[in-house]
Image (tube, rainbow, N blue to C red):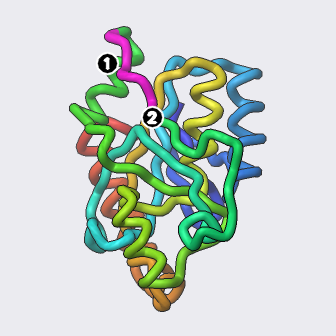
Amino acid sequence: MIVCAGDIEQFSFATPIGIGLVNSAINLTRLCIMNPPEFILFVGSAGSYGKHNIFDIVYSRAASNIEHSFIHNQGYTPLDNLIVADDVAPTKSGAILNSVIQSVSHETIVNSSNYITASKEASEIYLKIGLSLESMEFFSVLSVAKEFNIPVGGVFVVTNYCNKNAHKDFIKNHKEAMEKLELHLRHKGIG
C-alpha cells in the first residue's frame, strides 16, 4: 500500500491518509483494519534541518516525535519517541518495498510534529541530535505499521529548509518537488 498525506500532496498511485500526526494515524489505522496491506510506503514532502538540499530525494525507515520543548529542556515524555522499522522480510511484497528502499540505512531519521519548524537555531539542534528531515505524518505511519507488524518505509522530496522562510519556500518549491518525486517513483516502478 502506497500512502500520502493528501490535500496538495496527492498521487494517482497513493491513498491519502490525512495531514498531521492525528489524522494520518486514524485514517491509516482504519485502512489497515479494513484491508491489511503487505507493506506500507509513505511518499511526500519534507523539510530539511540542513543535511539535505532542496529537491533531494531521501529514503527512510526511522522516525521520531521530538518537540521544541524537548530540545530546549522545557518538557519530557514517558513515551517512546523514536521508531526504527525492522528490515523487510524477503516476501513478494517485501521485494517491492526493497526495490524502492534499496539498502536504506537507519541514519536518516525523519522528525514528526503537528508544527513546522521555522527556526534555524532549532534546526541546528535537531541536526546535532541526529535528525535530518521533518514530515508531519511519518512518525504516525511508522507507529501504525509497528502496531500491525507491517513492513514500512518512506520516500521524501525536500521542499524547504526549516527556517524562517520554511512556509514561503515550501509554497514556491512544492509543485516542482512533487513532479520530481513522482518522476523518481515512476522510474522505480511505482505508479
Circle 2 residues within 10 Å: few <14, some 14–19, many ≥20: some
* Mark 1: secondary structure: helix
* Mark 2: secondary structure: strand
Question: Residue 165 magenta-drawn?
Answer: no
Position of residue 180 in the picture relative to residue 138 (left or right): left
Residue 135's place in the image compared with 119, above or below, is above
| 82 and 153: which is toward the camera | 82
Residue 116's place in the image compared with 66, above or below, is below
Q: Which residue is mark 1?
A: 95
- Is residue 50 visible in the rendered image? The answer is yes
Q: Residue at x 32, y 39 (%)?
A: 106
Position of residue 134 in the picture relative to residue 102 (left or right): right
Q: Are marks 2 and 1 in contact (CB under 8 Å)?
A: no
Q: Which residues are magenta?
A: 84-90
Which sits earlier in the primary sequence, circle 2 or circle 1?
2
Give x and y (percent) for residue 122. 48, 77
Q: Residue at x 52, y 49 (%)?
A: 64
- Is residue 160 visible in the rendered image? The answer is no
| 48 and 127: which is toward the camera | 127
Circle 1 residues within 10 Å: few <14, some 14–19, many ≥20: some
| 131 and 112: which is toward the camera | 131
Assign the magenta stretch its main secondary structure.
loop
